[in-house]
Image (cartoon, rainbow, N blue to C red):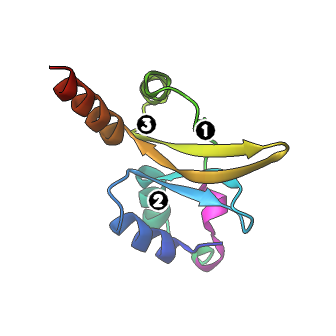
């Protein structure tokens, strides 16, 4: 239900290039990329006050908390994204758990390499 103004504020406050969109129950809806947000800002019209985050959200491959970092990087590379949503599934219910960024993955790999040496 976030407005374009809310999305702009959220984009300014994050280091990620995408914003996750969840519904009122915390179920993942999709991602709003900074590119899509920029296009929405540039094409502002009389509909601007009624455009919500869910209208701009694009479906994205979600990761499970049990997926490997290798799989996460493969999906990021295949989709050209620098961050992916992590979704926990409990039976029929799925809840947004957070974002995993390429930067996060590389930091963990660097730490593992430093410990191995």
Where, quadrant-wise, is the N terminus in this rendering?
Answer: bottom right
The answer to whether the residue labelled 3 contacts the one labelled 1, judged by CB atoms less than 8 Å apart, is no
In this image, 103 relative to 67: left or right?
A: left
Q: Which residues are magenta?
A: 49-57
Q: Residue at x 46, y 57 (%)?
A: 39
Q: Position of residue 14 (x, y in %)?
A: 36, 62
Circle 3: element type: loop
Q: Residue at x 58, y 32 (%)?
A: 66
Residue 101 lies, with reference to residue 80, above or below; the image says below
* Circle nearer the viewer, 2 or 3: 3
Residue at the disc numbered 2: 37
Q: Residue at x 37, y 52 (%)?
A: 16
Q: Main secondary structure of the magenta part?
A: helix
* Circle nearer the viewer, 1 or 2: 1
Q: Residue at x 60, y 79 (%)?
A: 49
Residue at the disc numbered 3: 81
Residue 24 lies, with reference to residue 57, above or below; the image says below
């Amino acid at each position: 239900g976030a407005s374009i103004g809310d999305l702009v504020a959220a984009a300014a406050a994050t280091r990620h290039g995408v914003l996750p969109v969840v519904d009122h129950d915390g179920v993942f809806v999709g991602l709003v990329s900074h590119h899509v947000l920029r296009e929405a800002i540039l094409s502002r019209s009389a509909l601007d006050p009624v455009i919500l985050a869910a209208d701009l959200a694009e479906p994205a491959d979600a990761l499970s908390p049990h997926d490997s970092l290798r799989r996460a990087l493969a999906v990021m590379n295949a989709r050209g994204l620098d961050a992916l949503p992590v979704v926990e599934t409990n039976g029929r219910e799925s809840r947004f758990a957070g974002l995993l960024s390429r930067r996060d993955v590389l930091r963990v790999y660097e730490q593992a390499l430093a410990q191995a040496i």
